[in-house]
Image: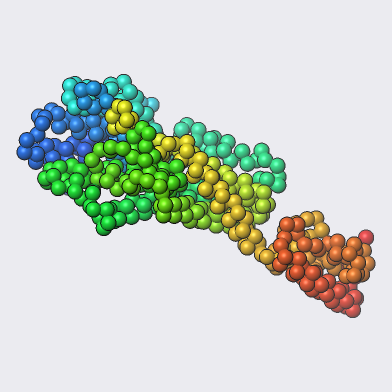
Amino acid sequence: MTQLMGRPLLEVPGELGGRPVLADLLAGVRTALVGLALVGVPVLGLWIATPYADSDAAGATRLAGALWLLGHGAPVLRGGADAPLTLTPLLLGALMVVRLYRAGAGAASRRGLRSRWGGPVAVWTGYCAVAVGVVLHCAGPGPFRSRVLPDLLVVGLLAGLSTAAGFRSVRPETAFARFLRSVAVGTGSWFDRLPPGWRPVGGMPAVCRAAAAAGAGLVAAGGLLVAGAAVLDAVTGGGRGMALLGRGPAALSGLLLLTVLLLPNAVLWGAAYALGPGFEVGAGTLVSPGGTELGAVPEFPLFALLPQEGPGGWRLAVLLLPLLAGLVPAVLLGRAAAGRRSPVGAGPWTPAATAVAALAAALLLGAGAAALGWLSGGALAAGRMARLGPVPWWTGLAAAGWLAAVAVPGALLVRHRALGPAGVECADGVECADAAVCADGVECADAVEQAETVEGPVDARSPAGGTAGLVRPAPGRGVHARLTVPVRRRALELRARTHALVRRLSGQRGPTG
């Protein structure tokens, strides 16, 4: 009995011991039904709890199906005028992506041979089969209606990408994985096309880490602004958001559910606000640190957190948040430029290569910010409410500009501090570290001694001979370097003379020309 209970229900003996296509197909169906249940159960519960509901059970299920489609980014029509509804609840979308990703990974982890129609293809087919039923059910008359062809295309695209990503995470040696690897190699080879002095060797991982750290900092800034606005509204704003919640338990639960689903959207809007361009809450409106222009907005708890109309004033202080978000990427790039995380034998980057890496991280962050800004926005209706959320290209430009302004000088400063403040150069132009060791491992003092053996005694008073031509301040150094390099040069000359004298007294001779 225990063995029977431990066996999966979908375990059907297939050819050569592998699972049949039906098992993967049912896995996709189960994934879609679980996601649909996550939306349908609360909606049906609210419909039951509402004393005088305007619709029947079929209307409640259509509402659940419309929310499920919106979670995939599919457009929905609202009302008798067929007003577009394209504002995607990002939390619901993230849940769908995670479910599909895990389904693809589960299909890849199953052992045994399978046909070419098995695996992620079968999972995707089962998921889309449920989507077809939901779309057709929501196509009938009601407050929310689906658009059959666009909705199926969007759901199929999201399901295919998420399932393929999960399959690739378990089986990296697939055609899809080889394609992704070729794209990554092509992106990394862009650095190889630069001149040697401008090329950050092995810098793509550091660039990606810096961009991810900057993105995390901006998201944290957006969350901080949303939380601060909620506290400020509750304390000094008259409780505008709380006043909307006193409409009965069913309305309260529904508003809280929608607020939670749209909370990631609000965080991204807060990040766009901190960057400067802000966001729109309808055509002809603007919410930014420089000022707020609003008209009539829908009654919703998150809209109650919007600032009052008028000039920005003290709200301009939020522009410090992108500066703080750029500090960690600057440190990461500076440490990578100093050779702390570089591949073996790569060595430190030049200042130009460090600046190139910082600009590449800024461009990567700008592309991600523009994409997230586009995903977080949408339309609530036609006309004035057809434009909500950040303007994608303005948000991307602002994110790239802030990170470039902070990361380029910050990374150069961290690199300078990591390599040491003194900074001397060998005769071939290679910088020496604090330990006075050249890049090839030869100490500068030994180089001085060898030069003395070949060219004769070192004359410290001659600016053209001895170590005066061998050890010199690195170009671009500051006052500290100009003061300390002569002292270090005299110390190296003294060490070289002492070493040469000891070798002569011991009867050893240096290399001769």
Image vertical order of residue 470 relative to residue 65, above or below: below
**Tally of numbered tags:** 0
Residue 15 sits in quarter: top left
Does residue 265 appear left or right of residue 56 in this picture?
A: right
The image shows residue 271 at horizontal and vertical percentages of 41, 47
Q: Quadrant of the N terminus?
A: top left
Q: Which residue is at a point 88% across and 76% down the rendered structure image?
A: 501
Q: Quadrant of the C terminus?
A: bottom right
Image vertical order of residue 328 relative to residue 247, above or below: below
Foreground residue among 52 and 283:
283
Task: Check the image and tell me how it is coloured.
Answer: rainbow
Q: Which residue is at a point 44% across and 36% down the rendered structure image?
A: 392
Q: Which residue is at a point 53% across and 35% down the rendered structure image?
A: 183
Q: Using the rendered image of the protein, determine whether residue 438 is visible from the camera's viewpoint.
A: no
Foreground residue among 166 and 273:
273
Does residue 76 appear left or right of residue 220 in this picture?
A: left
The image shows residue 133 at horizontal and vertical percentages of 22, 25
Does residue 182 appear left or right of residue 383 in this picture?
A: right
The image shows residue 48 at horizontal and vertical percentages of 9, 38
Does residue 306 appear left or right of residue 46 in this picture?
A: right
Outermost residue to the front? 310
Outermost residue to the left? 51
Foreground residue among 322 and 135:
322
Residue 412 sits in quarter: bottom right
Q: Using the rendered image of the protein, determine whether residue 408 is visible from the camera's viewpoint.
A: yes
Q: Which residue is at a point 9% across and 41% down the rendered structure image?
A: 49
Residue 435 sits in quarter: bottom right
The image shows residue 411 at horizontal and vertical percentages of 59, 55
Foreground residue among 459 and 30:
459
